[in-house]
Image (spheres, rainbow, N blue to C red):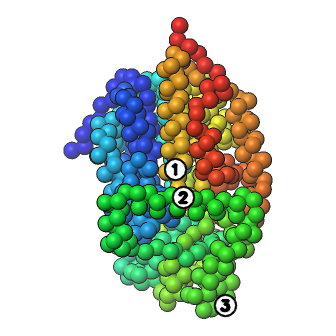
Amino acid sequence: MKKKQTLPGHVRIFVIGAGFGGLGLAIKLRERGETDFLVIDKGADVGGTWRDNTYPGAACDVPSQLYSFSFAPNPHWSRSFSPQPEIQAYIQDVSEKAGVRDHFRFGVEFLDASWQDGHWAITTSAGSLTADFVVSAAGGLSEPKMPDIDGIDSFAGDVMHSARWDHSIDLEGKRVAVIGTGASAIQIIPEVAKVAGHLDVYQRTAPWVMKRKDRAYLPLEKFAFKHVPIVQKAYRTAIYWGRECFVPAFTLAPQLALPAKLDALDNIKRSIEDPEMRKALTPDYDMGCKRILISNTYYPALAQDNVELVTDGIAKVTGNAVVTTDGVEREIDVLIVATGFHTTDLPIAHHVVGRDGRTMAEQFEAESMSAYKGTTIHNFPNLFQIVGPNTGLGHSSMVFMIESQLAYILGALDEIEKRGVSTFEVKREAQQAWTDDIQKRMAKTVWSSGGCASWYLDAHGKNVTLWPRTTFAFRLALARFDIDQYDVEVTA
Ligand code: NAP
């Protein structure tokens, strides 16, 4: 029987989401002696996106050594790029060892929060409570986006989104279709192609796919990671700075991506013999405009006899088939949609009401999605966002960005206590200046000029998701909580 969750009537700090952000914050709060905080998550465990994305082949595109907390190195990584089960096991292990799990309430859904009389009034699926501070660590890639395709609801077979994989569905010998060719799809397709009777891959836009330089760690390396921590630190440092060197190719001069582009073209050439198919798989926009993908198995899978690459648009889905705009009907048993997430229209924003009575979504709609330093939002006092607007990356580890935000939040709590602050709210001008600077830099990036549409851009074509500088610049910008950029109320 499911254990009924009980929540206190009030907490000092209320955290939404138990992924890297929520867990990292819980650990740091405990380290500073904080005990009055609660982390809720609608899922059954820590892990966030790594708990939810269990599709076959799921693995990280950022090297293992960098895709982990700096304060919790993992000597047990088996490979240079970690598979999802290892990352999820790492997150679970970190939460156990830090002894913070008693602050988490799983299976509790955040419903809404509104700023009332100097505190947050919150409703969850397990009841209501109030909080002095709210931290939204709900993640930018947590709400699956279903494709808006005519008739998809009438499909009689099994349909699953990549982030909600149903392991009870047996794909052996079945006729399967995958819609999408993004980061999730190109990992799923090789695995499904191994077992499906037939697989149709519906590509709307070809991705750039480089070779995946993944390898199992040697026993000697693993020994060194375990017993000589400085070795692991040296790996991490080298990878970190190596990745920082990629930034100018995204933000200043896309031609710097030429070696990567040649690698990706060679990746196609090695596996695909048919010139027509090579052409269909070659992107017609600048590399980096959409997320650059890495795989050694995607193109070989497409070349298999039981796999068909379909580039005609999808007209509709019927009870048992996908029909393309040329009228061809391809019958299937299972439909897999790897169509991404709600990134610029975060569902949670509809459920947080600020000081002036508007929801965060209404404010974003009127002024565009933005946050000061990706973390605080005017009209939303005493609220922090982890992985907020313009904190996403195309080249390095989000865990590094999260740790920068954790330092900023901890710095804020220090200042608040020192000065007896009861309420803080970022000044509108400070947020505007921060956002203007980001958007000015954005104009020069491949994400704006690269000739593609991507999940980085909002409905108006504005990049509200990515950080257009080095991660080091972000770390420096968030190193100190700059209270002078905030309106504060001090307890009498
Ligand atoms: P995504 O990058 O948004 O890709 C969605 C795919 O679905 C695209 O190919 C898109 O085509 C296609 N699509 C969407 N709607 C469609 C429609 N109505 N009809 C036909 N095709 C449609 O989503 P994702 O692959 O889940 O990846 C999202 C992000 O998660 C990644 O960019 C990455 O940041 C992260 N991720 C990382 C990893 C990793 O580290 N290995 C793995 C998975 C995900 P268009 O390109 O034409 O829009």
Find disc 3 in the rendering and name its residue.
Answer: 275
- Residue at mark 1 to residue at mark 2: CA–CA distance: 9 Å
Instruction: Kindly identify the residue that appears in the image at 61 percent across and 42 percent down.
Output: 476
Type of amino acid at the residue the image marks with label 1: Phe
Structural crowding at the residue carrying mark 3, measured as other residues with C-alpha within 10 Å and reported as few (<14), some (14–19) or many (≥20): few
Q: Earlier in the sequence, mark 1 or mark 2?
A: 2
Residue 362 location in percent, x, y?
65, 35
Q: Which mark is residue 400?
A: 1
- Residue at mark 3 to residue at mark 2: CA–CA distance: 38 Å
Callout 1: SS: helix
Pick the quarter of the image with the N terminus: top left
Comparing 441 with 12, the one in front is 441
Residue 268 location in percent, x, y?
61, 83
Query: Against 290, is 359 above or below?
Result: above
Structural crowding at the residue carrying mark 2, measured as other residues with C-alpha within 10 Å and reported as few (<14), some (14–19) or many (≥20): many
Query: Against 235, is 278 above or below?
Result: below
Comparing 158 with 197, the one in front is 197
Instruction: Kindly identify the residue that appears in the image at 74 percent across and 52 percent down.
Output: 442
Q: Earlier in the sequence, mark 3 or mark 1?
A: 3
Query: Ligand 1 is located in which of the four quadrants?
Result: bottom right
Q: Earlier in the sequence, mark 3 or mark 2?
A: 2
Mark 3 against mark 2, which lies toward the viewer?
2
Type of amino acid at the residue the image marks with label 3: Pro
Residue 312 location in percent, x, y?
65, 77
> Is mark 3 in CB contact (under 8 Å) with mark 2?
no
> Is mark 1 in CB contact (under 8 Å) with mark 2?
yes
Type of amino acid at the residue the image marks with label 2: Tyr
Q: Quadrant of residue 3?
A: top left
Q: Is residue 149 left or right of residue 2?
A: right
Q: Which mark is residue 240?
A: 2
